[in-house]
Image: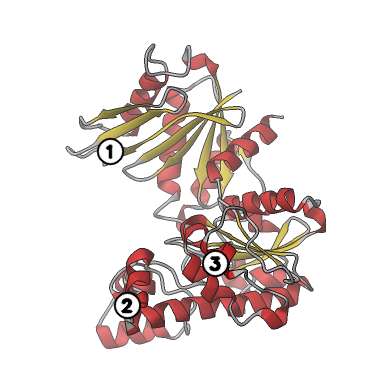
């Protein structure tokens, strides 16, 4: 079956077409609705690329152009639009409505609309992608795959905050967690690599990129995660502060004369690595660290220290650990940051092989006598979305 994976932003549209689990074509439309709009298309089978540099009026026009490329006699990979069996949509927030992916009908779409207050920057764009795809691909099944769904298995003691009961019941304030599609995928891949059933494993997965989160996974189920009501909580990230004293937002508002939007801008866009060093590019920060930069050293040590504290906490609630799994841009590519995250944890049975970490040619980076496996596994959220679609359709 042919499945098109869509990730719709407010002015962008990322797509990848699969046959079964094999990618056939992909690309990206950017700056939709602007004079500088453009679209990139790749035929992965024939290794062909085409760039369209004319303005794209809206998402519908962008998706129609994607369809034109997919069915083009020279560039395309589809004989006709009817070959497309499903469209899988990345949806950021499913709230408490969804613990699994869902075939989109009016009821499901209404529930996604109801989650807009929880993800005002993301869910409206995801909804736009769904409504556009329904018009352009009317015969394909539309399936929503939620970033939050994997973490709906958290026990109440893990997802509740110590706030008035009405704040949870009336406003939905609780820990939801994000990057669930990635955490689920690498957990499955870790089980595959270890040659053991996922149901037997205790894992800590680290999705480390410009946005970062960790998950404690027991028996294939997420039992805790670092992100909360929003993606701001938890680890130090590219531009996000991560955990901080809850009184700090009020303090900032009072002393800097900021409104709620201004405080939000500071914590989400001006903090994290960017706030500490002036850059949110880890390559720049690592270069500064190697050159003896004090700001860069503090940033990397602060961020890895935060991760070590979560490793210790998750070890406690898991009751042991089979594997620590690094993934995403930083997790897969930064030997220095991986080293900082695990050094000094030998007393917990977590020991890195320095040579394997510097030149990883296989997923296992753990020292020979390490009780816990240290793995680096590439994430593939688009492939996981395809698998979710196939599971929904049956």
Which residue shows up at 78% across the image and 72% down it? 320
Considering only vertical position in the picture, is 205 above or below 350? above
For residue 32, which numbered disc appears in the image?
A: 1
Q: Looking at the image, can residue 163 be seen?
A: no
Q: Earlier in the sequence, mark 3 or mark 2?
A: 3
Q: Nearer the viewer, residue 165 or 78?
A: 78
Residue 181 visible in rendering: yes
Q: Position of residue 31 (x, y in %)?
A: 26, 42
Q: Check the picture and name the quadrant holding the C terminus.
A: top right
Q: Are marks 3 and 2 in contact (CB under 8 Å)?
A: no
Q: Which residue is mark 2?
A: 291
Q: Is residue 107 left or right of residue 336?
A: right
Q: Secondary structure at mark 3?
A: loop
**SS class, disc 1:** loop
**Residue 166 vertical position relative to residue 247 in the rendered view, above or below:** above
Q: CA distance from mark 1 to mark 3?
A: 30 Å
Determine the secondary structure under disc 2. loop
Q: Residue at x 56, y 57 (%)?
A: 360
User: As drawn, is 13 to the left or to the right of 153?
Assistant: left
Which of marks 3 and 1 precedes in the sequence? 1
Separation of disc 3 and disc 2 at Cα? 32 Å
75 or 181: nearer the eye? 75
Name the spot of residue 30 as percent of width and height, x first. 30, 40
């Amino acid at each position: 079956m042919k499945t098109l994976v869509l990730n719709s932003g407010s002015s962008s549209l990322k797509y990848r077409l699969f046959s079964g689990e094999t990618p056939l074509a992909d690309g990206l439309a950017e700056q939709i609705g602007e004079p500088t709009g453009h679209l990139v298309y790749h035929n992965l089978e024939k290794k062909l690329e085409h760039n369209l540099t004319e303005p794209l009026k809206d998402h519908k026009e962008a998706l129609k152009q994607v369809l034109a490329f997919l069915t083009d006699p020279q560039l395309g990979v589809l004989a006709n639009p009817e070959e497309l069996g499903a469209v899988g949509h990345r949806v950021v927030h499913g709230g408490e409505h969804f613990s699994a992916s869902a075939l989109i009908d009016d009821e499901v779409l209404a529930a996604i609309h109801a989650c807009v207050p929880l993800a005002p920057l993301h869910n409206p764009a995801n909804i736009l992608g769904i409504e556009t795809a329904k018009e352009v691909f009317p015969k394909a099944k539309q399936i929503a795959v939620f970033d939050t769904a994997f973490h709906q298995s958290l026990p109440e003691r893990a997802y509740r905050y110590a706030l008035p009961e009405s704040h949870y019941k009336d406003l939905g304030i609780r820990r939801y967690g994000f990057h669930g599609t990635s955490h689920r995928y690498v957990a499955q891949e870790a089980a595959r690599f270890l040659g053991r059933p996922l149901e037997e494993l205790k894992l800590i997965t680290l999705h480390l990129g410009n946005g970062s989160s960790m998950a404690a996974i027991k028996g294939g189920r997420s039992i805790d995660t670092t992100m909360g009501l929003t993606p701001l909580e938890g680890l130090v990230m590219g531009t996000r502060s991560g955990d901080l004293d809850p009184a700090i937002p009020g303090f900032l508002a009072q002393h800097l004369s900021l409104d709620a939007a201004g405080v939000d801008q500071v914590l989400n866009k001006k903090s994290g690595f960017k706030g500490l060093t002036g850059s949110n590019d880890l390559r720049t920060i690592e270069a500064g660290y190697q050159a003896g930069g004090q700001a860069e050293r503090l940033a990397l040590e602060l961020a890895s220290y935060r991760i070590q504290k979560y490793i210790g906490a998750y070890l406690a609630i898991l009751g042991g650990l089979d594997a620590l799994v690094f993934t995403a841009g930083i997790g897969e590519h930064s030997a220095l940051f991986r080293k900082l995250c695990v050094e000094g944890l030998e007393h917990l049975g977590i020991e890195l092989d320095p040579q394997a970490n510097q030149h990883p040619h296989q997923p296992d980076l753990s020292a020979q006598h390490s009780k816990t496996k240290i793995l680096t596994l590439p994430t593939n959220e688009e492939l996981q979305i395809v698998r979710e679609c196939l599971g929904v359709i049956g």
